[in-house]
Image (tube, rainbow, N blue to C red):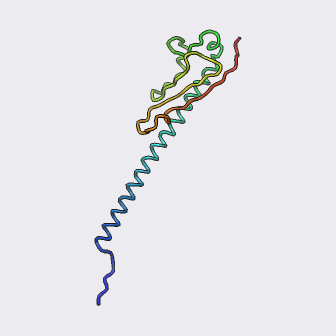
Amino acid sequence: MRVVSGFSLLEVMVSMVIAAIALLGLAAAQIKAMQFAQNSFNYTVALIHGQNAIERIWPDICHYQSVNTSLNPVANPTAAWLYPNDPRFTLTLPDTFSLDMSLTVSWHDERMTNTGVDQISLHASFVNECL
């Protein structure tokens, strides 16, 4: 009696289907990881833009406290440089300067389904420098 060793064609085909499904799952996980990495990068850049806006208020704090309290660039040209030059990000400031204020930096990432993850909010507290 002759003994045949090896794999049958059916066993090879089943193992190839299982391997293909596993590789597709790995590819989907890699794509999702890249999406979250890009969103994390955008979060970091938005945080930098928000911190820059807060830091840019300090040199002109007397102007914002006593001369022109508007943070609208149309009403107060000095406020124009608070906004980021990067068109991917939108800075939302209150209409007028206050010693305690919140600002929001948002961006649009069409790959993310939850829109709440596309923005950051910062709270700034300033001292009354110019009386």
Q: What residue is at 54 percent from the left and 27 percent from the top?
A: 104
| x then y, percent, for residue 10 | 29, 70
Q: How many marks?
A: 0
Q: What residue is at 51 percent from the left and 15 percent from the top?
A: 73
Image quadrant containing the N terminus: bottom left
Residue that sits furthest to the bottom in the current view: 1
* Whether residue 73 is situated above or below residue 122 in the rendered picture: above
In the displayed structure, does residue 127 sit left or right of residue 47? right
In the displayed structure, does residue 28 sit left or right of residue 94? left
| x then y, percent, for residue 79 | 55, 16
Image quadrant containing the C terminus: top right
| x then y, percent, for residue 19 | 37, 62
| x then y, percent, for residue 102 | 59, 25
* Whether residue 63 is situated above or below residue 106 in the rendered picture: above
The quadrant in which residue 94 appears is top right
Q: Nearer the viewer, residue 59 or 32?
A: 32
Q: What residue is at 70 percent from the left and 13 percent from the top?
A: 130
Q: What residue is at 46 percent from the left and 37 percent from the top?
A: 114
* Whether residue 29 is situated above or below residue 95 in the rendered picture: below
The quadrant in which residue 35 appears is top left
Residue that sits furthest to the top in the current view: 67
